[in-house]
Image (tube, helix red, strand yellow):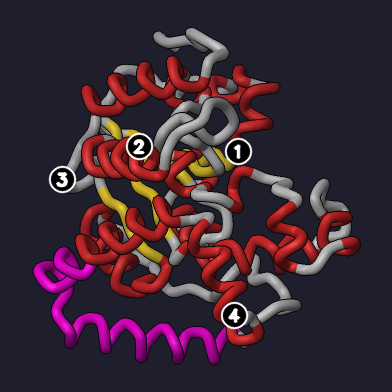
Amino acid sequence: MQRQWFSVDDLTNYTINKQHIIKHLNKGAYQKSSELCLFSHVPKTAGTSLEQIVAKNFKVSETLHINAPDLNRLPAIIQAKKYLPKFICGHHPLHGLVYQLLSEQSLFHFTQLREPVDRVISYYNYVKGKTDHPMHQHTVKNNFIEFLNADPSPELSNGQCRRFSGYLHQGQASDSLLFQEALDTLTNCFSLVLTTCLFDEGLLLLKNRLKLKDIYYQKQNVSDKFLHKEELSDIELNFVSERNLADINLFNTIKNNCIELVSIEVPNQELHRFKTKNTTWQQQIN
């Protein structure tokens, strides 16, 4: 490997990583023979489904799934084989170690965002249904609003912006700064940014860029619905929104960009054909 962990300061690492990504980013079509494909998985954005769809288009030996905490403990795993994997995926914020372990090669870098209020509710449902989760006790003792007020995770308050601005675990920043930094990162450090609400449309964009042959899927890692959005009052919904204003602005901007990209690159007939075939495929699997 040509790079190493330069600093334990998140904002410093964030700056170093941005410089490396911008230098090597490929905004066009992915070239498997010479490039690395990296998926930065934001928790509770249907990223598990997306990872599995992309991964089945690579050889098992070409794929590495690892999350940031595990990579921090075992950084040597990324070079356990003679060559870097072709596809790396997992929960990796922009200040993460993974970016400083990459070689000097071209990079196709993508991620996916989710509507922030829906994401926070999904996060709560996930934690409540997973009894071995470190935050589970917060859902046992508290209702949804009490759970948020306990502030057990930075993911619940502008977590998407924080992941892309270096402020996930360290430092304080205004909503405006979080939004501007995250938008700059997504604009300049990613080949493609998708949204969960346009999942199929995004898959077709990704299919064209990565030259994927198989994108049929079933949803993975779906949380039990202990709480539905419709059950929340306007006051409760406003409370969640106010905690996630930067994320809401970021999501709306990216969603509009994605809609425009889809209108240019994905014909309606192609989208309809894929949805029909995928429904048939799901029925056959079931």
Dot 4 surroundings within 10 Å: few (below 14), some, or many (20 or more)? few
Q: Is residue 178 above or below residue 20?
A: below
Q: Nearer the viewer, mark 2 or mark 4?
A: 2
* Residue 167, numbered circle: none
Tell me, yes or no, whether the two marked residues, 1 and 3, touch with CB atoms within 8 Å: no
Q: CA distance from mark 2 to mark 1?
A: 29 Å
Measured along the vertical axis of the image, is residue 270 above or below residue 71?
below
Q: Which residue position holds label 4? A: 229
Magenta-colored stretch includes residue 150: no
**What is the distance, in whole Å, between disc 1 and disc 4 at their CAs?**
31 Å
Mark 2 and mark 3: span between their CA atoms?
A: 29 Å
- Find numbered disc 2 in the image and state the secondary structure of the residue it sits on: helix
Nearer to the camera, 57 or 106: 106
**Residue 63, how many percent across, how many down?**
50, 42
Please state which of residues 108 and 153 is positioned toward the viewer in this rendering. 153
Q: Is residue 4 left or right of residue 274?
A: right
Residues drawn in magenta: 259-285
Circle 3 residue: 28
Q: Which percent across, then down, holds residue 283?
A: 54, 91
Query: In the current view of this chain or complex, which residue is farthest to the left?
Result: 264
User: Could you tell me which secondary element the residue under label 3 belongs to?
Assistant: loop
Which of the two discs, 2 and 1, sits closer to the camera? 2
Q: Which residue is found at the position 42% from the left and 67% from the top?
A: 196
Asked if residue 108 can be seen in this view, the reply is no
Check if mark 2's residue and mark 1's residue have beta carbons within 8 Å.
no
Looking at the picture, which amino acid does disc 4 mark?
Lys
Question: Which quadrant would the C terminus be assigned to in this image?
Answer: bottom right
